[in-house]
Amino acid sequence: MQPLIFAATCDLAGKVRGKAFPAGDLKRRLSRGVGWTPTNVQINCFDGIAESPFGALGDLLLIPDADAEVRSDFGSVVEHFMLGDIVTLEGEPWELCTRSLLKSALARLERVADVRLLAAFEHEFQLKSEFELEGEAYGRTGFEMQRTFCESLTSHVAAAGLSTDSIMKEYGSNQYELVIGPEEGIRAADAAVILRELTRSTARHSGEAATFTPIRDPASVGNGVHIHLSFLDRNGNPATFDPDGPCGMSRLSGAFAAGILKYLDSILALTAPSVISYLRLTPHRWSAAFNNLGFRDREASLRICPVTTKDPTAVSRQFNMEYRAADAAACPHLALAALVHAGVQGIEEGLSAPVPTEEDLSLLSTEALNARGFVRLPETLEAALGKFGANATVAGWFSEPFVQVYLAHKASEIAHLAGMDTAAKCAAYEMAY
Ligand code: GLU
Ligand code: MG
């Protein structure tokens, strides 16, 4: 058997695509990559091809990155892949490469605020077993039924150089959650992709199937992706916490949080990018429906998380904020790029820290909400795309071609679902993610 390495990109659809090459060619492939086609970026999550400015023209290279390598032994087969960057034939980052877009957002953060980002992704997913496991929310029995799967998954996660914080049987039917530790910069988004792929592979190799679809059953809970954010200064010291700041936020993190909330309705199309993402982002589902900051409140878009220590040094390392309006239809690199840009924009604009809410915002009228600077987040993908496409500041963070291509990409996804009822849409996304 000839071992193959799969060079991969996580694209606009949040799908991991690429090409495999013989492992013996690795040295050459690390510099020359594999050939890639511009119009591939317009393949949507249902394999339809959206209107593409490139047509049949052009060539690109997908260059695998040795720092984003996964080699997982599943006994009968070794899954070996590397995430990479898409570059032009001249070697310049391609303007639609999600990894390169995140790199440039992170560079802006360093330039403007002289800090580096730490991020940890929490993922919820469901096993599509024939057996519906009900009544086992956070249950030990529910966990035991998949202990072998959980141990196998966390072993593969460890072999990929990532650390498991915790794994559990979540609230929903057959729903599990895996939380990994924080990683720095680009590695954090790579880790999210790796985690999703290893979860799917582990399920597949144990005769199961896993789905990260944003929501399987509109009558129940969704599968969220919660992104924990904190900062390190140039000496590697934590820069997120200030014991005298509002809710413990440093000036930097207060402005960053305010930027995210100010631009949230315009970046939502990048962090919650499917049609059914908006079934999840409704009040009383412990997801996110308004652009509010919550102090330990799981219905807020941005939540200040609790710290579990009194030691001041440990507190400042542990302190972080959690973005909850994301799901796994989103490419982690794009979602993180949007959050970083919005946060840095808040720093540049000198915004002051948001005031946390402590009540149920769904009980307020639109006027009362708006008077306090809150909005109900877009309630459909179309509305979210409308906000994204119309916000000149947000467009300025990315390139104009990126915005146009993204809007066309999502239009084709929406068109694919036209005429389907909600159950059929959920079924389609369950297959895709
Ligand atoms: N399932 C919820 C979501 O869609 C999150 C529940 C929790 O707080 O873990 O985001
Ligand atoms: Mg959870």
Image (cartoon, helix red, strand yellow):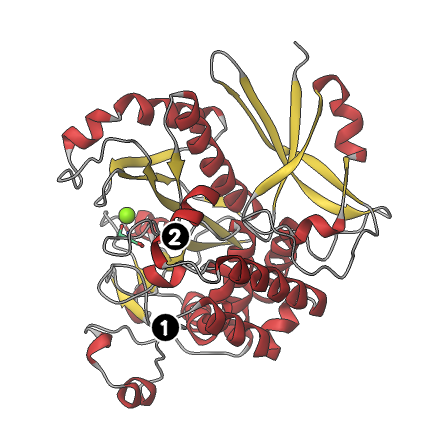
Q: Mark 2 points at which residue?
A: 424
Which numbered mark, 1 or 2, is in the foreground of this view? 2
Rendered image quadrant of residue 155:
top left
Query: Which residue is outermost to the left?
Result: 135
The residue positioned farthest toward the right in the image shown: 90
SS type, badge 1: loop
Q: Name the residue under label 1.
A: 291
Identified at 59% across, 60% down, the residue is: 412
303 vs 426: above or below? below
- Residue located 73% across and 52% down the image: 39
Using a 10 Å C-alpha cutoff, classify the residue at mark 2 as few (fewer than 14 neighbours), some (14 to 19) or many (20 or more): few
Of residues 387 and 29, the one nearer the viewer is: 387
**Residue 173: horizontal and vertical position, in percent?**
23, 41
Q: Nearer the viewer, residue 360 or 378?
A: 378
Judged from the image, the secondary structure of the residue bearing numbered disc 2 is helix
Q: Is mark 1 within 8 Å of ligand 1?
A: no
Q: 398 or 362: nearer the eye?
A: 362
Query: Which quadrant of the figure has residue 209?
Result: top left
Question: Callout 2, which amino acid?
Answer: Ala
Report if the beta carbon of the residue with label 2 is closer than 8 angstroms to ligand 1: no
Q: How crowded is mark 1: few (under 14 residues within 10 Å), some or many (20 or more)?
A: many
Disc 1 from disc 2: Cα separation: 30 Å
Q: In this view, does 114 lie to the left or right of 39?
A: left
- Residues at marks 1 and 2 touching, judged by CB atoms closer than 8 Å: no
Residue nearer the viewer, 75 or 154: 75
Q: In the rendered view of the protein, which quadrant contains the N terminus?
A: top right
Q: Residue at x 34, y 76 (%)?
A: 376
**Residue 233 placed where, x, y %?**
51, 55
Percent position of residue 100, x then y: 67, 52
Residue 227 in sight from this viewpoint: no
Q: Which amino acid does label 1 sit on?
A: Asn
